[in-house]
Image: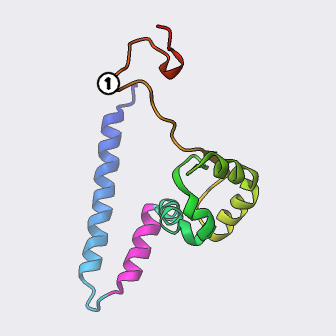
Amino acid sequence: MKRDIARELFRSYRTKSRKNNSQEEDRTKRDEPEKLSNILDNLVTTRDWKKGIAEGTLFTKWREIVGNEIADHCEPITLYEGKLTIRAESTSWATQLRLISPELLKNIRSRSEGALVDEVNVIGPNAPSWKRGLRTIRGAKGPRDTYG
């Protein structure tokens, strides 16, 4: 006998919606108001948002986590699968941050609890693009291609 996955999903959805309706009914029967912090904590734990919130605070509180001097010269770009990418404002700052990346990683782990950072990747500033502009030629190699 074949399994009908669509029916199983529909049944599980119906049972979950019934459970949710009973929880909503219980909540509406309460006479006393709840604290907003308790409601938000409950929402965060039931939806499993703790990791995302911790990663968000890493970006918003970057200056507090790494310090003023480092934060003045770099910014976090992405945090994907435990790899934090940081963009430095110059190549010299990128080199310095690569040298202190183990200490920086320890500092990030200790000050931003919940954010899963396993590796720090430091990149330099964006290089100018020679692909577009007023005097570009298709197939040219940029400023190095002087003798077309």
Q: Quadrant of the N terminus?
A: top left
Residue 86 visible in the snapshot: no
Residue 23 visible in the snapshot: yes
Magenta stretch contains residue 86 = no
Residue type at mark 1: give it.
Leu
Q: In terms of secondary structure, what is the magenta stretch mainly?
A: helix
Question: Looking at this view, is 107 or 9 the one in front?
Answer: 107
Question: Looking at this view, is 33 or 146 the one in front?
Answer: 146
Q: Position of residue 57 (x, y in %)?
A: 50, 66
The part of the image, by quadrant, that contains residue 21 is bottom left
Name the residue at 27% across, 72% down: 24
Q: Is residue 108 left or right of residue 128?
A: right
Q: Position of residue 10 (x, y in %)?
A: 29, 43
Q: Position of residue 44 (x, y in %)?
A: 44, 68
The part of the image, by quadrant, that contains residue 108 is bottom right
Magenta stretch contains residue 45 = yes
Image mark count: 1
Q: Position of residue 80 (x, y in %)?
A: 54, 46
Name the residue at 64% across, 70% down: 111
Name the residue at 63% across, 47% down: 122
Give the farthest residue toward the bottom. Answer: 32
Above or below for 6 versus 91? above
The part of the image, by quadrant, that contains residue 117 is bottom right
The residue indicated by pointer 1 is 134
